[in-house]
């Protein structure tokens, strides 16, 4: 029987769609995964050894070591609303042009608009091309 632990595990997603675990204000990323378990480590890295193991089937936390050598990070969790959308060049292939759009303000964030090709030829009529 697994030992009960007195903390709450909360799941969040970064704007890059990476899943993070939050326990007592500290964030963890999935370092390794196999059929039965996944190993989660503190996102701070460096000397921080905080970690836990999650049983894949039951979602039970096993072998938690939640002793951090730093303060919790500052972050904001928006209640389930996706705040950004990611956009990539429609050419695909090797072109890495992209940007992130804040869905509330329509601000462009983290733009990388360097294309490895010429602009495509197309016609826009009534908002459709």
Image (tube, grey):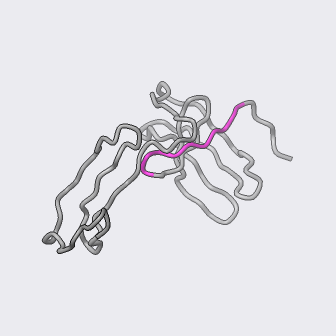
The stretch drawn in magenta includes residue 27: no
Question: Is the residue 72 above or below the residue 11 in the image?
Answer: above
Image point (51%, 40%), residue name:
42
Judge whether residue 13 is colored magenta: yes
Residue at the front extreme? 126
User: Left or right: where does residue 119 sit relative to residue 28?
Assistant: left
Q: Residue 87: image x %, image y %?
A: 34, 57
Q: Is residue 97 above or below residue 104?
A: below
Judging depth in this view, the residue of 16 and 85 nearest the camera is 85
Q: Is residue 11 left or right of residue 43?
A: right
Of 63 and 110, the residue lying toward us:
110
Residue most toward the right?
1
Q: Quadrant of the C terminus?
A: bottom left
Mark count: 0
Q: Measuring from the top left, give residue 121's x and y in whole percent.
A: 17, 74
Q: Hey, which residue is sitting farthest left in the picture?
A: 118
In this view, the residue in front, 111 or 46, is 111
Q: Residue at x 28, y 65 (%)?
A: 89
Q: What stretch is highlighted in magenta?
A: 7-16
Q: Quadrant of residue 32?
A: bottom right
In the displayed structure image, the side of residue 121 where residue 57 appears, left or right: right
120 in relation to 27, above or below: below
Q: Position of residue 64 (x, y in %)?
A: 66, 40
* Residue 45 point in image, percent of width and height: 44, 41
């Amino acid at each position: 029987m697994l030992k009960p632990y007195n903390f709450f595990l909360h799941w969040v997603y970064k704007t890059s769609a990476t899943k993070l675990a939050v326990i007592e204000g500290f964030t963890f990323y999935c370092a390794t995964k196999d059929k039965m378990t996944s190993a989660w480590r503190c996102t701070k890295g460096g000397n921080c050894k905080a970690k836990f193991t999650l049983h894949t089937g039951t979602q039970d936390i096993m072998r938690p070591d939640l002793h951090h050598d730093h303060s919790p990070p500052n972050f904001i969790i928006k209640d389930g609303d996706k705040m950004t959308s990611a956009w990539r060049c429609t050419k695909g292939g090797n072109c890495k042009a992209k940007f992130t759009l804040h869905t509330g303000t329509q601000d462009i964030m983290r733009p990388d608009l360097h294309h490895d090709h010429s602009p495509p030829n197309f016609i826009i009529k009534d908002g459709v091309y």
